[in-house]
Image (cartoon, rainbow, N blue to C red):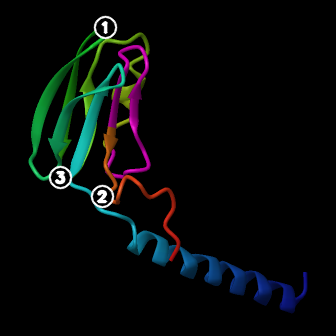
Amino acid sequence: MTKADKILIVCIMILSIGLIFPLLHNAPTSKVAVVQVANKEVLRIDLTQNKEYTVKGKLGPVHIQVKDGAVRVRQENSPHHTCSKQGYVSNANTPIVCLPNETVVQIEDGQDSNEDTVIQ
């Protein structure tokens, strides 16, 4: 590996890191999470208030906790407790899905629902 190769690798790394910042800076912020059970909306959660909620899932109650603008499933009745192990979610691109309970917690991205893609 020559000196020019090393310089090229460093330049590519700096460029790729520099391109990540606009993506993170323009990430949509949302203040609402939607809880659906069996594809029906049962609850809209304000993420600005630290609070706990309970909804009835297929296998029993699903306890949802909001803290510091993030949401998580604190406790639920399912065989592997996968959705409660997922932890806090604050990104609209990461839903919490509890398949045995047929429960989905999705943060709204704050964009118009008719838009499919935004090009900047």
Helix, strand or loop status at disc 3: loop
C-alpha separation, residue under disc 3 versus residue under disc 2: 18 Å
The x and y percentages for residue 86 are: 39, 34
Residue at mark 3: 68
Mark 3: which amino acid?
A: Asp
Magenta stretch prevailing secondary structure: loop
Residue at mark 2: 110
Mark 3–mark 2 contact, CB under 8 Å? no
Are there few (<14), some (14-19), or many (20+) residues within 10 Å of tag 3?
A: few
The x and y percentages for residue 103 are: 34, 23
Mark 2: which amino acid?
A: Gly
Instruction: Report the side of 113 relative to 120 (left or right).
Output: left
Q: Quadrant of the N terminus?
A: bottom right
Residue farthest right in this picture = 1
At x 36% / y 24%, what residue is drawn?
Answer: 39
Are there few (<14), some (14-19), or many (20+) residues within 10 Å of tag 2?
A: few
Which contiguous range is marked in magenta? 89-105
At x 43% / y 70%, what residue is drawn?
Answer: 24
Helix, strand or loop status at disc 1: loop
Mark 1: which amino acid?
A: Leu
Q: Nearer the viewer, residue 60 or 43?
A: 43
C-alpha separation, residue under disc 1 versus residue under disc 2: 31 Å
User: Quick check: is 9 in the magenta stretch?
Assistant: no
Residue at mark 1: 59
